[in-house]
Image: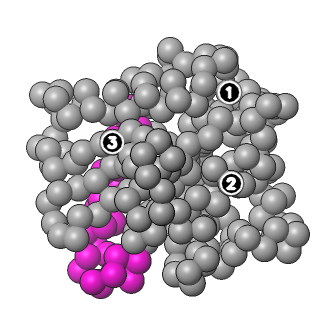
Amino acid sequence: MILNKPDALWQTYFSRVRECVHQLLAWGYEDIKSKVTPENQEEDITGWLTEAIDLRFNDRDTPQEYEHYHIGEETHVPHVSASGKNRKRIDIVISNSHTKPRPKFCFEAKRLKKGTHTIRKYTGDGGMQCFLKCEYAVEQPEAGMLAYIQDLSPDHWFRQLQKIFDNSKEDPTLNIVEPLKKVQVLKDLPHEWESKHTRSDGSHLDLLHVFLDFRATIVSADV
């Protein structure tokens, strides 16, 4: 079975995997958000997030269902034609070993910070394009982008992302099938959207956009 064309039974199971992956992200985010500053690098935040999720696996209060989940950071991409240090790496991979084929959820993370870490880096090479060009998660029906917000508001950055989607004729590499829509898999991750795309090989991709708010002072005003 090709995973990017899953059968109905596998897709039903994957829906539960999606929920569990979001719960792991929510736990990790809650555990590290107080230590992240506007100056921390992407690699630092990803490392802390991965470590926090890994610690949750050993927590006695974590439900037994999560014993089948595993997390990897900076995971090598097996199918890309490169070797050694030149091999591409996915920022975060959360996999489930309870069924076969094993579902995996791959995330690419990007900082969002005014002036230095723009929304173009999020949508460009090293960001969304890693999925759209079949560099990452090529066998999976879904993948995710994590935005580490270090200034301005989630709504501000969403509007920036929306502008790029609205002007997609200027950037046909986005291959948009369905535009951004608000979703909420978990209430603890309130800033999330979904878009649908065609990858460079013609396969379908559902892409989730999860914005994690790491501003030094989280304010209610939309700036």
Q: Residue 13 colored magenta? A: yes
SS under mark 2: loop
Question: Which contiguous range is marked in magenta?
Answer: 1-28
Q: Residue 96 in the image: x percent, y percent?
A: 23, 56
Q: Residue 190 in the image: x percent, y percent?
A: 54, 44
Describe residue 19's horizontal placement relative to residue 107 as left or right.
Answer: left
> Which residue is at 27% across, 83% downward?
1
Mark 2 belongs to which amino acid? Asp
Q: How many residues crowd mark 3 within 10 Å: few (<14), some (14–19), many (20+)? A: some
Q: Earlier in the sequence, mark 1 or mark 2?
A: 2
Principal secondary structure, stretch drawn in magenta: helix
Q: Which residue is mark 2?
A: 125
Between circles 1 and 3, the one closer to the viewer is: 3
Describe residue 186's horizontal placement relative to residue 191 as left or right.
Answer: left
Measure the alpha-carbon separation of dots 1 and 2.
21 Å
Between 119 and 214, which is closer to the camera in this rendering?
Answer: 119
Q: Earlier in the sequence, mark 1 or mark 3?
A: 3
SS under mark 1: loop
Question: In the image, which disc is placed on residue 72?
Answer: 3
